[in-house]
Structures are given as C-alpha cells and as structure tokens.
Image (cartoon, rainbow, N blue to C red):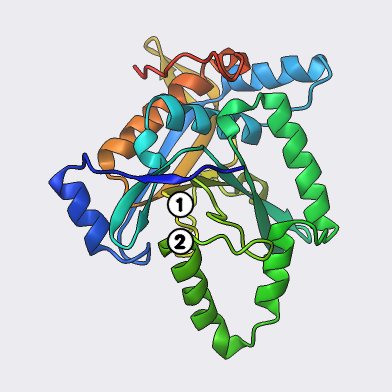
Amino acid sequence: MSGGLRPVDDLSAGRRLAAASYSPPTEGKIFGTCEVDATEALRFLERRRAEGVRLSMTHLVIRTTALILRDTLPELNQTVRRGRLYQRSTIDIFLSVALKRGKEISGFKIEQVDTKSLEEIAAEIKDVAIRIRRGDTTLGVVRTQQLLQSVPGPLLRPALRLLRLLVIDFGLDLSPVVPKDPFGSLLVTEIGSYGLGVGYPALLPLSGASCIIAIGKIEEKAVVRDGEVVVRPILPLSATFDHRVADAYHAGLLVRSAQEILTHPERLEEPPDAAEPTQPS
C-alpha cells in the first residue's frame, strides 16, 4: 500500500512562496520537451522480445522515472496541501489507459514502482488494463468513474472541488470509492499511438501529482554524432510540471537523467533494491 506523507521544512524561500501562492495547477505550470536517441532502448526491447519477454517503451519510461524520483529527484515526489509541501514516502506512478480505441481515457496507479522489475511492471499494467476495459468494479478507478458519471452536470465541478479538498488537501482515504492520493507521484501517458510527437497534457487539479509525462511517437531523424550526420530513431518526451513543486532546475535534471538511463537501458534490469543513484552527465 502507499505510504504516508511528512512535512518538508528545509525549503528555499522561493519554493515556499510558490507552494503557498499558486492555486492547484490551473495557474502555475512549466512545460518542457526533450528528445532521446532510442537506438539502444529499441535494441534492448528487441533482445528481451527474442527472450520471450514483451516489454514496451512505456514500461522503460515508467521504471526510468521511478528510479529518478528515488535516486536523483525526490523533490518531484512531493505534493502540496493547503500551501505546504509534503514528501511522499513511496513512489507511485499513474498510467493512463486508452479505452474504446482511444475515444475514452482511464488509468490506474502503480504503487511502489521503484521496488518492481520491468517484468513485474509490465505484468501489472497488462492485468489492470484488461480489468479496466472489462469494467471490473473491484477496481477503485472504475468505481470512481461510475460515481462521477452519476453526478448531474451542474454539480460535477462542485463535486470535484469537494473531492480535492477531502482527498488532496486533507489527505482523507475515501476508499473504496476514492483511495488516498489516487494519482500518486506523477502521471505517464502514451500519446505516440495517436500519431503525436509532442504534447503537454493538463495537470488535473484533483491529482496532486507534481508532473505528467507524455511519451511521443518515435521517428527517424537526422542527428549529428561524432561530427557526422546520421539517422537515428528519436523518442520525444514532453512534460507539464506543477510550478509549486518544480522549476527549470528540476525539469532539466529530469531530462538529463532520463536521457542517461534510456540510452543505457541495461541499468533498468538491475534488481529493484540494487540500482545505483543516477548520475546524469
């Protein structure tokens, strides 16, 4: 289960001001994009596929992000409650799932991602995604969607504001309808299947997450390597950050760390409790 929160007191004056000044992310947002040479990551996926293990770029990005939050950027694993930053004790990542051929979007939280292997992450995603598409009411996300669908249109916004107040600002556990911290540390969405390379998804005020990362469509591009122009498969990653939690420093460090890991994907196969702290170049 997800852990609790502890107040963060050793904050800079600017971070304290940002946390107290901005409303939940309808105002303070930062947007960023980076490109990752996906050559080694695609080779890694092909090798694992030949070994009978079906993984995807989404699985790699999820575990990469979890390791960065654990080893390099624990600040991104914070949330804001009533103008004060709190540190999460576990790293939980929310993955969006396309329904009805992409016409609807749902999703679910993967708990303690940094403690799970790529194979465990892939198996959990496959299992829960199937259950969501079947409308399995034992899942909290399905029950929450059914609850919100039953709320009359004019009352939906006030209902969402009340949910945010109870679940995010006061940290209440309203299970089985709405679990505590339902979206976790951050969100990941795959937009490449829609033909998109770059996109900046909106941060839901109800989420309490520090950022949302969009995985774009891999395309071949001309790049310079060792003074020569060569063609490489390029993976675009874009993100929207809650400026109350993150600024350009955090965005830049996240980018450099992700590039370092995804160009050396063998690091993702290390036992979950034995991964070395990320040292971006």
Q: Is residue 72 above or below residue 281?
A: below
Circle 1 SS class: loop
Is residue 222 at all visible to an observer of this figure? yes
Q: Is residue 102 above or below residue 121?
A: below
Which badge, 2 or 1, comes first in the chain's sequence?
A: 2
Q: Is residue 83 left or right of residue 119?
A: left
The location of residue 115, given as percent across then percent down, is 59, 27
Residue in the image at 62% along x and 45% along y: 192
Which of the two residues, 220 or 86, is positioned nearer the viewer here?
Answer: 86
**Mark 1, other Cα within 10 Å: few <14 / some 14–19 / many ≥20:** many
Which of the two residues, 23 or 250, is positioned nearer the viewer here?
Answer: 23
Q: Is residue 164 above or below residue 263?
A: below
Q: Is residue 39 left or right of residue 261?
A: right
Residue in the image at 66% along x and 24% along y: 117
What residue does disc 2 label? 168
Which amino acid type is shown beneath numbered disc 1? Ala
What residue does disc 1 label? 209
Which of the two residues, 263 or 194, is positioned nearer the viewer here?
Answer: 263
The location of residue 55, given as percent across then percent down, is 72, 28
In front of the other: label 2 or label 1? 2
Spatial separation of the CA atoms under disc 2 and disc 1: 10 Å
Q: Quadrant of the C terminus?
A: top left
Is residue 213 at all visible to an observer of this figure? no
Residue 187: numbered disc: none
The location of residue 151, given as percent across then percent down, is 65, 83
Which amino acid type is shown beneath numbered disc 2? Ile
The location of residue 45, given as percent across then percent down, is 69, 21
> Which image quarter: residue 28?
bottom left
Circle 2 SS class: helix
**Mark 2, other Cα within 10 Å: few <14 / some 14–19 / many ≥20:** many
Residue in the image at 49% along x and 20% along y: 261
Q: Is residue 67 left or right of residue 95?
A: left
